[in-house]
Image (cartoon, rainbow, N blue to C red):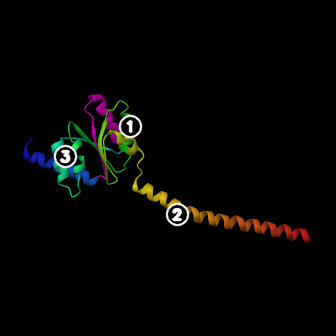
Amino acid sequence: MKKEDKVSVVASIASLIQEYAHFYVTDITALNSEKTSALRRRCFNDGIKLVVVKNTLLKKALESLEADFTALDPVLKGNTALMFCNTGNVPAKLIKEVGKDGVPALKAAYVEECFYIGPDQLETLVHVKSKNDLIADVIALLQSPAKNVVSALQSGGNTLHGVLKTLGEREA
């Protein structure tokens, strides 16, 4: 590969990393062409961009970015495929569903600005909530006491009204 080609590939990888909020480093070498095509199709349908990269070019792309990605250095061995997505747990769910026999194999992931290294992190990644999901949970928790107070006041008013009405009818 010519140096100019390498520079453009590094720039392309770096722009993908900046474009997507999350990425997974996987190994898909054990897949034959039919299964690879099926995986690519499934990734496309789930909104995941799958890119096979050379480790040295990926390392250079990561070094060119402002963030510190040195935690990924130990897993950049062998064949590497990157899965890019804007929803943190979608690739993990895909790997868990499709990879019943360990293929594609998770090497590492960068999700919600955290590193997850090793295939044992797959179950954790499946259950990771996005930032928006966490904000929605906090808002629901904050609204819950207010809703309970409003509900109690409304039901108390109806109960009081019923008691007064019954007492009013009784004296007549």
User: Is the C terminus in the top left, top right, bottom left or bottom right quadrant?
Assistant: bottom right
- Crowding at dot 3, Cα within 10 Å, few <14 / some 14-19 / many 20+, comes out as many
Is residue 137 magenta-colored? no
Kindly identify which residue carries mark 3: 58
- At label 1, which amino acid type do we have? Lys
Q: Is residue 9 left or right of residue 92?
A: left
Query: Which of the marked residues, 3 or 2, is nearer the chain's N terminus?
Result: 3
Mark 1–mark 2 CB contact (< 8 Å): no
Q: Is residue 16 left or right of residue 152?
A: left
The alpha-carbon separation of the residues under discs 3 and 1 comes to 24 Å
What's the residue at 24%, 47% (across, down)? Answer: 72
Figure disc tally: 3
Q: Is residue 122 above or below residue 35?
A: below
- At label 3, which amino acid type do we have? Leu
Q: Position of residue 108 (x, y in %)?
A: 29, 43
Q: Position of residue 142 (x, y in %)?
A: 52, 63
The alpha-carbon separation of the residues under discs 3 and 2 comes to 43 Å
Kindly identify which residue carries mark 2: 142
- At label 2, which amino acid type do we have? Leu
Q: Position of residue 123 (x, y in %)?
A: 40, 41
Q: Nearer the viewer, residue 79 or 115?
A: 115
Q: Which residues are magenta?
A: 20-44
- Crowding at dot 1, Cα within 10 Å, few <14 / some 14-19 / many 20+, comes out as many
Q: Is residue 48 left or right of residue 142?
A: left
Kindly identify which residue carries mark 1: 96
Query: Which of the marked residues, 3 or 1, is nearer the chain's N terminus?
Result: 3
- Crowding at dot 2, Cα within 10 Å, few <14 / some 14-19 / many 20+, comes out as few
